[in-house]
């Protein structure tokens, strides 16, 4: 019995080993890169640097301690990221479930069968009784006869393999490969979600800091306009200026008050957005204070000399794993056209007496191989093969589109990087010029040389220039964050 048990367990394992290298899936080849080999060139672009953003850890890029702490909170508490990480666990379990079909499942069972024959049949088959699993056992000493009725008890203990499919054509192996690629795709999806979360948190933090700066500018402007209004009213009372100047000063103050309220609302909404992405309330000590230098310093991102760096982006890698999985599905669809061989067998002991179940001479075994040859399925197998090929072709197009999208996003970010610094410089010059013009207009108005309209125009120009400078600095900082994301920045 021991030798039989070894044979029954070894045969499926040997068959699995022999068939493990067979697969009918097409040989996978990565599609050609559908984008130019180099980045765009022109006046809008700065020279690219050699290197990969994936090699840059996020703490080395986001160097501000407060911003680092906020990002760490987001990585700990964000619910979307938790879902992505749980998806890895789910797809890994699905892969392990599918992979288990490559090996025979060995089960142990024990049965006790009790049977009573009615009085009219008590004489039929008196020389034997059919037991479990087709075994035949004599009734001598095993049957109790009373009032013409007969009771029979049969005990069995078995270990066996049930319906194990020999993967001769690689159907199970192809399905296992597809499940494995889904698992790898979920890992890249989680990495992509992590990078997106880091960049989104930083962008929301920078936006909050910039809008708090704009709020500070609006507060200073309102204070200045109210002081000007007070002076203008006093000059009107002394007959120095007309009522028109008073109304114009009131208009400027009212506009500044409206801008302040709008800026207050925007800053509050920015904080709400930051708290959502962080997954909890952000401590006040970690928030930007709205001063001119409150935007954190960010490291520059190497863009790489070749666009092939985009092939390492996690979303592109995710699309490629999906493609490889769909390619493996073709092998499973092709295998459906070939015969299927499955093995069922068991070995153990069988006895009419429980205390003699494992005694010598009680051994029993069964072995039942089955072969199924597909003859007619109404076109189902052909349709499944066409479906698998169509899904593979769709995955190719999706992969190529992912690469093209990555190239476009990176090219846009590089174009913005090439002019962002010069825009800040131009905006700083504009603020200086507008500030000087405002001082001159104030002096000329106080001496009665210019009308209040000229002063009002200078005030609005200076206010707009200040707001524009804050926006330009935010654009530069956001551009660096975008480059970190689109180039597949590191998540260490």
Image (cartoon, rainbow, N blue to C red):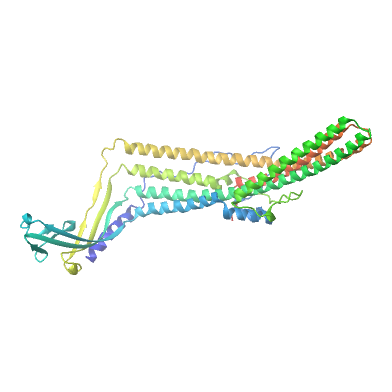
Indicate the position of residue 120 as horizontal and vertical percent values.
Answer: 6, 54
Residue appearing at x 33%, y 47% in the figure: 169
Quadrant (top left/top right/bottom left/bottom right) for the C terminus? bottom right
Indicate the position of residue 23 as horizontal and vertical percent values.
Answer: 36, 47
Residue appearing at x 49%, y 38% in the figure: 397
Indicate the position of residue 284 as horizontal and vertical percent values.
Answer: 68, 54
Dividing the picture into quadrants, the one containing residue 407 is top right
Dividing the picture into quadrants, the one containing residue 411 is top right
- For the view shown, which residue lies furthest in the left direction? 123
Q: How many marks?
A: 0
From this view, report whether residue 360 is shown above or below residue 240: below
From this view, report whether residue 371 is shown above or below residue 453: below
Viewer-proximal residue among 191 and 81 = 81
Quadrant (top left/top right/bottom left/bottom right) for the N terminus? bottom left
Viewer-proximal residue among 474 and 30 = 474
- For the view shown, which residue lies furthest in the front direction? 237
Residue 303 in sight: no
Residue 120 in sight: yes
Relative placement, left or right, of 275 versus 163 is right
Indicate the position of residue 482 as horizontal and vertical percent values.
Answer: 64, 45
Relative placement, left or right, of 123 versus 287 is left
Residue appearing at x 70%, y 41% in the figure: 418
Relative placement, left or right, of 261 versus 200 is right
Viewer-proximal residue among 441 and 161 = 441
């Amino acid at each position: 019995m021991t030798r039989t048990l070894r044979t029954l367990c070894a045969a499926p394992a040997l068959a699995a080993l022999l068939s493990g290298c067979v697969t009918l899936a097409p040989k996978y080849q990565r599609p050609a890169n559908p984008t130019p080999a180099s980045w765009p060139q022109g006046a809008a672009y700065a020279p690219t640097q050699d290197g990969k953003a994936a090699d840059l850890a996020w703490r080395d890029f986001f160097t501000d301690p407060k911003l680092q702490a906020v990002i760490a909170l987001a990585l700990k508490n964000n619910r979307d990221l938790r879902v992505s990480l749980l998806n890895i666990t789910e797809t890994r379990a699905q892969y392990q479930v599918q992979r288990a079909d490559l090996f025979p499942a060995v089960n142990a069972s024990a049965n006790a069968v009790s049977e009573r024959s009615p009085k009219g049949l008590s004489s039929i088959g008196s020389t034997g009784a059919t037991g479990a699993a087709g075994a035949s056992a004599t009734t001598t000493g095993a049957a109790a006869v009373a009032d013409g009725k007969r009771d029979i008890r049969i005990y069995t203990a078995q270990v066996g393999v049930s319906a194990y499919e020999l993967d001769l054509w690689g159907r199970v192996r192809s399905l296992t490969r597809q499940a494995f690629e889904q698992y790898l795709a979920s890992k890249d999806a989680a990495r992509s979600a992590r990078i997106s979360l880091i960049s989104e948190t930083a962008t929301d933090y920078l936006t909050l800091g910039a809008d708090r700066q704009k709020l500070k500018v609006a507060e200073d402007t309102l204070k200045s306009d109210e002081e000007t209004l007070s002076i203008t009213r006093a000059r009107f009372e002394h007959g120095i200026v007309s009522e028109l100047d008073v109304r114009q000063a009131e208009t400027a103050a009212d506009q500044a008050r409206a801008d302040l309220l709008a800026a207050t609302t925007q800053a509050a909404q920015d904080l709400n957005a930051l708290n959502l992405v962080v997954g909890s309330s952000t401590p006040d000590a970690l928030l930007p204070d709205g001063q001119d230098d409150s935007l954190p310093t960010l490291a520059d991102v190497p863009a790489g000399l070749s666009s092939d760096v985009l092939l390492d982006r996690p979303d592109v890698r995710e699309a490629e794993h999906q493609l490889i999985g769909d390619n493996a599905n073709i092998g499973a669809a092709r295998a459906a056209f070939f015969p299927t061989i499955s093995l069922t067998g068991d070995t153990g002991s069988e006895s009419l007496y429980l205390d003699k179940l494992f005694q010598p001479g009680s051994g029993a075994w069964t072995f039942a191989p089955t072969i199924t040859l597909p003859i007619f399925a109404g076109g189902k197998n052909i349709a499944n093969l066409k479906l698998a090929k169509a899904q593979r072709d769709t995955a190719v197009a999706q992969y190529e589109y992912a690469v093209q999208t990555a190239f476009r996003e990176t090219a846009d970010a590089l174009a913005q990087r090439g002019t962002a610094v010069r825009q800040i410089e131009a905006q700083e010059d504009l603020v200086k010029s507008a500030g000087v013009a405002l001082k001159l207009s104030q002096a000329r108005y106080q001496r009665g040389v210019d009308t209040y309209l000229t002063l009002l125009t200078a005030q609005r120009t200076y206010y707009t220039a200040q707001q524009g400078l804050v926006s330009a600095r935010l654009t530069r900082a956001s551009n660096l964050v975008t480059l970190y994301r689109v180039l597949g920045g590191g998540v260490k």
